């Protein structure tokens, strides 16, 4: 009873409230789940497009300029404008958000993957050729593993910025945690809701970043050995 | 089907209506707002970031801090800052929007100022010290002029980014060209498609225009002998920001 009274006595507008988090855990979890799934899907698609592009730019130097230029131009288009370009065609929904976010992630991953690939020492490349590796064998067994640190750097940057960018999806009603933030703003500027959405966003970015950093350590054991020696 | 040509035609029609340009809240009004907000944000960003970046570069410390600031702002959604700041002491209206945008202008400005001073030839620095320059004189008369290409590159990156991000101010009714896109989304997608697309074209066009103009400015303020070197350096500094 007293609990109920104290709850009624001070409605207030605190910056953070466990009461709000408890009462709305369903909404919050749905938004968090949507945000996570959008981010994961977007980054996966972006990697599947960006790494082959980087390999193409690495194999055929003539393509490097155009590929970097096109992804660079895509990166310069304001996010809201990109939504505006795509929404009339792709409609209101997940596809539009995913496309925009993937287009943004491309540049970062392509540039870092290409940097990683070009840093493969020429001696190593020649040795691989001398051992009879063909173009594809060398790519999968030599070039890509050695470029992995570069690719992972790009992946981490792309993931963190994707988490932030997904929130702009509110413009088509699919912003994940952005939905929470924006609804909080519209519902009488409810600070606790805005803050919860923001904190979860930053936290999500941090978790993804740490997970990718950990995965990178596991995938590149030779780097650890070298730094330990 | 005319589905593919539909929105583009509608956008052309919308852009061809003179009232859409001259009405209150029309394109001319919104462009003015957009530029005013962006200019204020970049100016505020410069006032904060350049002195700190130059000083950190001069003392040679704080490289980690620069990277930390860049990474932190990468993780914070623009939308969050735009909605949080009006609820603080800044109040509603333009100030919180300008501050939010300035926050995102700071990393490139800071990183380029820092890198610019660090990239000064150590021999030039030693020579200046040998001539009896004090620390402040060294910064003002040797390091600052030599860092100008970097400062210009950072200014361009920051300004283009702010002009692009300012479109999001429309989420909190902050004005600017994004307002046209938001209004279009407020209509049905079939009815507003043309306006949405037109707004997108205007925002992207403005960002591109700012990029082109500032690229020229950057070239003009870079001393002739440094021009080719400066451009390469600018790109390197931009890479430093994006971690590439």
Image (cartoon, coloured by chain):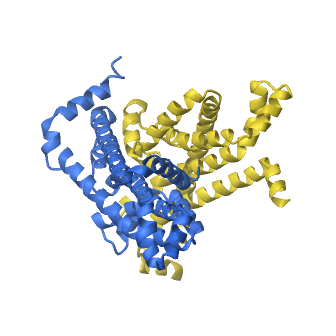
Chain colours: A yellow, B blue
A78 on left or right of B9:
right
Is there any visible trace of residue A117 in the rendered image?
Answer: yes
**A76 or A174, which lies in front?**
A76
Q: List x then y, in percent, for residue A31.
A: 53, 52
**Residue at (66% x, 44% y) in the render:** A151
Q: Position of residue A117 (x, y in %)?
A: 68, 39
Query: In this view of the protein, which residue sits in the foreground, A213 or B221?
Result: B221
Q: Residue furthest top?
A: B1
In the image: residue A12, left or right of residue A214? left
Vertical relation: A206 (above or below) A120: below
The reply to whether residue A191 is in sight is no
For image coordinates 29% across by 59% down, the residue present is: B39
Nearest to the observer: residue A120 or residue B159: A120
Badge count: 0
Which quadrant of the figure contains the C terminus of chain A? bottom right
**Image height check: is B167 above or below B11?**
below
Task: Report x, y in % for residue A39.
Answer: 57, 46
Q: Is residue B176 left or right of residue A156?
A: left
The percent position of residue B148, horizontal first and vertical second, equals 41, 60
Residue A54 lies, with reference to residue B130, above or below; the image says above
As drawn, the residue found furthest toward the front would be B131
Q: Determine the image quadrant of residue B158.
A: bottom left
Name the image quarter holding residue B144.
bottom left
* Residue occupying image coordinates x 80% and y 34%: A141
């Amino acid at each position: 009873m007293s609990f109920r009274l104290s709850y009624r006595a001070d409605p207030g507008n605190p910056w953070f409230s466990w009461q709000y988090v408890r009462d709305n855990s369903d909404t919050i979890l749905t938004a968090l789940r949507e945000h996570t799934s959008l981010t994961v899907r977007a980054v996966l698609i972006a990697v599947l497009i960006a790494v082959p592009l980087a390999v193409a730019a690495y194999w055929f130097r003539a393509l490097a300029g155009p590929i970097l230029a096109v992804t660079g131009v895509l990166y310069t288009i304001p996010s809201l404008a990109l939504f505006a370009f795509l929404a009339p065609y792709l409609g209101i929904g997940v596809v539009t958000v995913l496309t925009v976010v993937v287009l943004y992630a491309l540049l970062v991953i392509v540039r870092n993957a290409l940097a990683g690939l070009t840093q493969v020492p020429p001696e190593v490349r020649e040795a691989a050729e001398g051992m009879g590796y063909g173009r594809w064998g060398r790519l999968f067994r030599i070039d890509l593993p050695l470029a992995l640190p570069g690719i992972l750097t790009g992946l981490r940057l792309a993931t963190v910025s994707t988490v932030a960018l997904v929130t702009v999806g509110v413009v088509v009603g699919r912003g994940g945690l952005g939905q929470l933030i924006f609804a909080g703003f519209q519902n009488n500027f409810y600070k606790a809701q805005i803050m919860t959405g923001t904190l979860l966003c930053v936290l999500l970015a941090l978790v993804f970043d740490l997970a990718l950093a950990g995965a990178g350590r596991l995938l590149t054991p030779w780097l650890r050995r070298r730094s330990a020696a | 089907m005319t589905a593919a040509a539909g929105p583009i035609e509608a956008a052309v029609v919308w852009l061809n209506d003179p009232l859409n340009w001259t009405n209150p809240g029309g394109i001319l009004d919104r462009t003015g707002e957009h530029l005013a907000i962006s200019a204020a944000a970049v100016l505020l960003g410069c006032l904060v970031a350049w002195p700190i970046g130059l000083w950190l570069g001069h003392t040679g410390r704080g490289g980690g801090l620069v990277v930390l600031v860049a990474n932190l702002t990468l993780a914070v959604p623009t939308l969050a800052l735009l909605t949080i700041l009006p609820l603080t002491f800044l109040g509603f209206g333009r100030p919180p929007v300008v501050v939010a945008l300035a926050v995102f202008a700071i990393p490139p400005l800071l990183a380029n100022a820092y890198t610019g001073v660090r990239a000064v030839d150590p021999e030039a620095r030693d020579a200046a010290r040998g001539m009896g320059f004090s620390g402040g004189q060294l910064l003002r008369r040797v390091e600052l002029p030599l860092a100008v290409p970097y400062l210009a590159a950072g200014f361009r990156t920051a300004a283009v980014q702010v002009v692009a991000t300012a479109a999001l101010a429309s989420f909190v009714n902050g004005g600017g060209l994004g307002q046209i896109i938001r209004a279009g989304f407020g209509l049905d997608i079939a009815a507003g498609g043309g306006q949405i697309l037109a707004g997108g074209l205007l925002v992207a066009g403005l960002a591109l225009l700012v990029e082109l103009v500032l690229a020229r400015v950057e070239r003009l303020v870079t001393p002739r002998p440094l021009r080719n070197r400066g451009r390469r350096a600018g790109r390197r500094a931009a890479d430093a920001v994006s971690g590439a």
